[in-house]
Image (tube, rainbow, N blue to C red):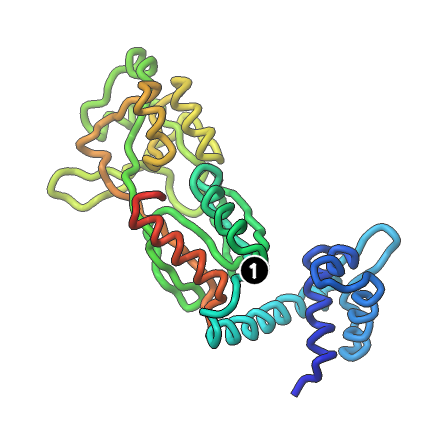
Amino acid sequence: MMPASHLSGVHAFVETAHHLSFTGAAESLGMTKSAVGKSVSRLEARLGVKLIHRSTRRLVLTQDGEAYLAAARRALEEIEAAEASLSSNHREIAGRLRIDAPAAWGRRVLLPILTEVALAQPGLRLSLSLTDRIIDPVAEQVDLVIRFGETADTADLISRKLAEQRAPLVAAPAYLARCGVPAQPEDLLRHCCVTGISREMPIGFRIARPGCAPQRLRVAPAHEIGDGSAVVEAAIAGLGIAQMPLSLVADALSDGRLVEVLPEFGTVPVGIFALWPRTRHLLARVRHVVDLLAAKGQAGAL
């Protein structure tokens, strides 16, 4: 069995690697800076490798340090999750939760929810990245990813559907007055389209023809923008037709800055999914946030 002092050294290293600072790790662990440094040094001596390059200006993980960090972080999370599964009703939600979500939706919808969680759970620490780039949560060591669109469990990931919402086709009245109103989905091929940027799948609009399964209509976008909020603003400015989740365009539709285009074809609901790396024990903080988001989804708040 590993002595407690060895486990303490692993904790000190993981926190130091996260902050790239002995000072930051000390504050997080409630230790002195000197104690953290000595604990990491003892770990390096026991392993017989250098985990961190130290200089007067900064700390940098070595190649061995990068490899050890991934394994050490998983091991500590397994221990924490196992303990949480035994006493989940008697412990506060604590520790660092690393989340990745689409940028515009994350700012508008997710961040207020996570703010509530963090205020209610003072021991919880958030690392939130908002990006429209599709990431590999296992490779990038992210605890929880939120994605729009269909997904499924894999050997490495578990998914849970949180909600679904319409993704209408929208355009500014000024654009439609200038370029005409599409009558059929194929008309979109002759219009200026504003889309996100995707390296993972063909650019297109999801179309639902009456009596047919939803399909993706591939378009050649006039403008590609790597941020959902900016896509909406571009559509409002009259640059072209866009398709975005209703939560991002509802205000602009209600006040007339945008109007719905081809409403009989653009009613395909898009799923909102939570994904997390497959482990033997689900981290209590991941379970807590996923359950809360699912409840919000059922209430129509996503």
Could you say which is closer to the camera, residue 54 or residue 8? 8
Q: Nearer the viewer, residue 169 or 202?
A: 169
**Is residue 256 depicted above or below 298 in this figure?**
above
Q: Residue furthest bottom?
A: 1
On the image, the x and y values in percent for residue 144 come to 48, 57
The x and y percentages for residue 209 are 16, 38
Please state which amino acid type lies under the numbered disc 1.
Gln
- Which element type, helix, strand or loop, lies under badge 1? loop
Q: In which quadrant of the rendered image does the N terminus lie?
A: bottom right
Q: Quadrant of the C terminus?
A: top left
Q: Residue at x 45, y 56 (%)?
A: 289
Residue under the image location 14 percent in, 44 percent down: 212
For the question of whether residue 140 can be seen, the reply is no
Which is nearer the eye, 270 or 199? 270
Instruction: Say few, some or many: other residues with alpha carbon within 10 Å of mark 1 (under 14 / 14 to 19 / 20 or more).
Output: some
Q: Check disc 1 and report the residue beneath it.
A: 141
**Residue 101 position within the rendered picture, expressed as x and y whole percent measured from the top left:** 47, 47
**Residue 188 figure quarter:** top left
